Image (cartoon, grey):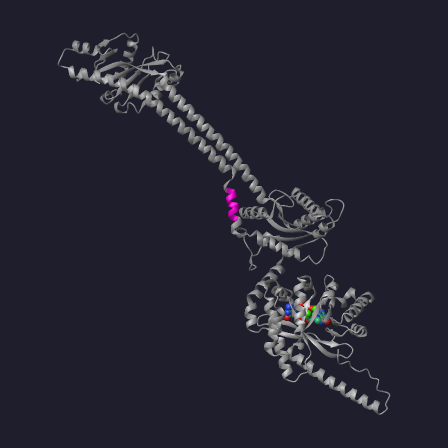
Amino acid sequence: MDKRRRKQFRALKKGHPIVSIGMFIAMCVALTVLVGTIASLIISYIIDSKLGAEYNDLQYMKRIYEASENKIEDGQIFELLNTEGRDYFIVSPDGQKVYENGENTALDQRYSAFLSYMTDEKSTTAEAEKVIVRFDSQRGLLSTDEEGYIQLDEWDLIMQLPDIVESSTEVGTTGTDNFLTRLFDIQPGTVAKIPLWFELPVGSAGNILCGKAFIKINMSDFAWVVTLFFALFMLVLVMFVIIFVNLLRGLVRRRNATKIFFTDISTKGKNWMWFLLRGENYLKSTFSKRDKFAVVNLSFVNYRNYCACHSLAAGDELLMKIDRWINERLNRNEICARVNGAEFALLLKFFDKRALEARVRELIDGLQNIDGEHIYHFQAGVDLVGVSRNANGKAVKRRFFDMEIAYNNACTTRETLAGTDESGMAFFDEKMVEDQRWVDMVQDNQRHAIDNEEFKVYYQPKYNPQTDELKGAEALIRWISPEYGLVPPGKIIPIFEKNGFITEIDHYMVTHVARDQKRWLDSGYKCVPVSVNISRAHFIESDLAEQIRDMVDAEGTPHELIELELTESAFFDDKKTLVETIKRLKSYGFAVSMDDFGSGYSSLNSLKDMPLDVLKLDAEFFRGENSGTRGEIVVSEAIRLAKCLDMRTVAEGVEVKEQVEFLASQGCDMIQGYYYAKPMPANEYEERMKSNESNLRRAAESVEAAEFSTLMGNSEGDTELPILGM
Ligand code: C2E
Ligand code: CA
Ligand code: CA
């Protein structure tokens, strides 16, 4: 498959729904995390800053205590501290209460908890560096009488607020009394007071100052955060919706594009592109598996006729039916698609070749009666994937499997049935591989062969059946290959016609025939016109007549010694150009003949417009069923028609005496066939020319003798005389 198509396909694949949905989910998660993080950061900041303010106050008390220590009496120190108006108490390192201020019913509880903390193994000096924060169980957010107490590293106080919250639930007895959940329980617009106890080491004696603090949170402070959070949330939600809708639309559009890309215009089923990609990917991926596969080219014979008799729409409808019918009969991992015209590609699974054969036969039989009204004909070419070959005829592993090659093999195989309109099937085999190899070899060698003059001109004489006189010849190519010996034209001309090399061959033949004729002329032979085949592909060249004229002139050969044969099928091409070319060829003095008349579609009509000189009756007239009375009528009428149109006739492929006699009786001008001679090399043809001359001489002598005897009054000279002229 070409690169452009593969690229387009990859682009389509990129938009696979799974990828899009995955991306969408990832975005949702990312945005939710972002919004959540921003909101919690803002809330943390507010709470932390309030907590920090309280903590700073206690730090201030600590500084007062430490500044006054040992300078004034303890009582005076406490008085100073009392002026701060904060509930607090001080305990000594051995857990003795030193002082307390303010009213607090829960003091004992906290105190005992504190004492247990102090006597804990972990509460070493290192722990004394920490700031202890306790939630007030009586009035605070913690509804039960639990003791939530939290340690904070002094310097991380603000940053670690979430830890405070977490720890409170850890230590809490219910575990559900989460600081934040409580916080959000508070009604908006009210002011919440969250009581806490901070514990700070104070003084040189290692006393602990436990100060009561309140975090006052005005819920209106939170209102804007909540509003912001909500706005952000809505924004994100709207974005999600927009993205989601767009994503959905994109998916639908992509699905539609993919559908169009892979939908066949006539059957509305899958198309060749889909088959190619799906089949190739599938076969490559199942490389190691045991399953064997077959690529089938299934062709509806005479589809064009069906369309002509009904309509194109009816044709499409039938194709649609066929496509559906086949698809309904496919097993898992088997695929089918219309390729073009009325041709379908199938990928079938099989285990046994005979079972596959039966299956394909079943498909063909079923399709023959698909609408229960008419009988349709289908032909199938099958290539077994296991024996696929590359262009060089080598077996290809599925890893390197090329669906186009396999399908091409299937098509080539199916084309071997194309001679008949009947249903049938054929398998791609070694013979076809051989054929392909041969084609490659010919193509590789054609240039070298022509440069090396390996192509030889063979001449097949044409005789006048009444006189057995040599009246002409046809030049036929042979390839004398150093490696393959004598190669007949049937093995090379179709290849050259396909690859365009035929125009060079035609030039080569015209030049060589003209050269031979000139040489024979110069050597004193009585030359007869030699016809050269001009390929149909050549006729698209508008200056063909001039090219031929120049080639013949280059050899110095008289134009009347060269005749040009155009095959009958060429008359269906561009008629105008053809008529022009024929006229110009004739104006230069070349004779032009219609080759293979009667072999293909009727070219009677062409005869009307083409100013041709010679009509060559195709060899088919003289084969098998065509012979007999009816055949004779056709031949004699064809000869009569040619005469009426002032054309000479040449009968080709005549092998038996009776045919020669019949043709002679009908006034056929020349016979080219094995009865007289097979195509022969130039030197043998020279011999024919020589013997023809001696025959002619003998004939002339007998004419002279007859005339003499007539003069002498001899009435026995009624020997049939050869007709020399035409
Ligand atoms: P064609 O032009 O119809 O040539 C006549 C073919 O019939 C020749 O086959 C000839 O050998 C064969 N033939 C003649 N008489 C008989 C007979 O009595 N019995 C049988 N069985 N066959 C007979 P050939 O030489 O194999 O050529 C085959 C075709 O190849 C030619 O058919 C022509 O279409 C093509 N071809 C041959 N040489 C050239 C060429 O130089 N240029 C082009 N363009 N085509 C050529
Ligand atoms: Ca011919
Ligand atoms: Ca012919």
Q: Among all residues in the image, which is located at the extreme bottom?
A: 712
Relative placement, left or right, of 663 versus 511 is right
Residue 432 x/y as whole percent: 62, 59
Judge whether residue 632 is colored magenta: no
Residue 202 x/y as whole percent: 20, 17
Vertical order, 42 against 495 (above or below): above
Question: Observer-nearest residue: 718 or 98?
Answer: 718
Vertical order, 233 against 549 (above or below): above
Residue 479 can be seen, yes or no: no
Ligand 2: image quarter: bottom right
Residue 674 x/y as whole percent: 72, 73
Question: Observer-nearest residue: 154 or 640?
Answer: 640
Q: Quadrant of the C terminus?
A: bottom right
Relative placement, left or right, of 626 versus 168 is right
Residue drawn 37% across the image and 12% down it: 144
Residue 319 can be seen, yes or no: yes
Judge whether residue 11 is colored magenta: yes
The answer to which quarter of the image holds residue 571 is: bottom right
Residue 708 x/y as whole percent: 81, 91
The answer to which quarter of the image holds residue 131 is: top left
Residue drawn 28% across the image and 25% down it: 156
Q: Which residues are magenta?
A: 6-13
Vertical order, 332 against 77 (above or below): below
Relative placement, left or right, of 24 versus 189 is right
Question: Observer-nearest residue: 689 or 236?
Answer: 236
Q: How many marks?
A: 0
Residue drawn 37% across the image and 24% down it: 40
The answer to which quarter of the image holds residue 97 is: top left
Query: Does the magenta stretch mainly form a helix, a strand or a loop?
Result: helix
